[in-house]
């Protein structure tokens, strides 16, 4: 019985070489997500320190929207018509063959 345990222990020792977090030839988290968010921010400094509300802005409106999201009570999106326009729906007429060709 001890020999079986010893064989299992020795066989598991080789698993560290196949651990994807220890291998150098595979992708690993490198902070690229933080870099992408910072690149998309209009003012990257806002990711470190936010801005205070300007005079006349109501922060409660924004806070209420966030609260509705967390509570799962989102407002429905407005309905949008997806009917194709006449210019897109109708294909162009075929070109007429030239008359008098080969006579």
Image (cartoon, helix red, strand yellow):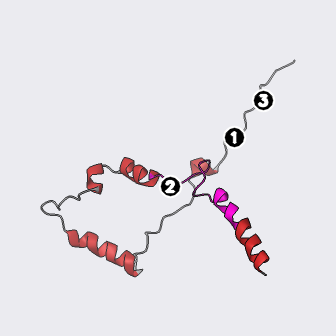
Instruction: Say if the magenta span includes residue 42.
Output: no
- Label 2 to label 3, Cα distance in Å? 63 Å
Residue corresponding to mark 3: 97
- Label 1 to label 2, Cα distance in Å? 55 Å
Mark 3 falls on what kind of element? loop
Q: Is residue 43 visible?
A: no
What main secondary structure does the magenta stretch of the protein show?
loop
What residue is drawn where x is 23% and y is 59%? 50
Dot 2 crowding, Cα within 10 Å, few <14, some 14–19, many 20+: few
What residue is drawn where x is 61% and y is 57%? 20
What residue is drawn where x is 81% and y is 21%? 100
- Closer to us: 15 or 69: 15
Mark 1 falls on what kind of element? loop
In percent of width and height, residue 35 lies at 41, 49
Dot 1 crowding, Cα within 10 Å, few <14, some 14–19, many 20+: few
Residue bounds of the magenta highlight: 12-31
Q: Which mark is residue 29?
A: 2
Which one is closest to the eye, mark 1 or mark 2?
Answer: 2
Residue corresponding to mark 1: 93
């Amino acid at each position: 019985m001890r020999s079986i345990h010893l064989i299992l222990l020795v066989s598991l020792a080789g698993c560290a070489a196949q651990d994807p977090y220890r291998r150098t030839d595979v992708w690993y988290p490198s902070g690229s997500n933080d870099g992408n968010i910072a690149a998309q921010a209009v003012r990257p400094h806002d990711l470190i320190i936010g801005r205070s509300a300007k005079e006349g802005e109501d922060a409660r409106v924004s806070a209420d929207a966030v609260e509705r999201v967390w509570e799962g009570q989102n407002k429905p999106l407005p309905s949008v018509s997806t009917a194709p326009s006449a210019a897109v729906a109708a294909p162009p007429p075929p070109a007429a063959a030239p008359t008098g060709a080969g006579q």
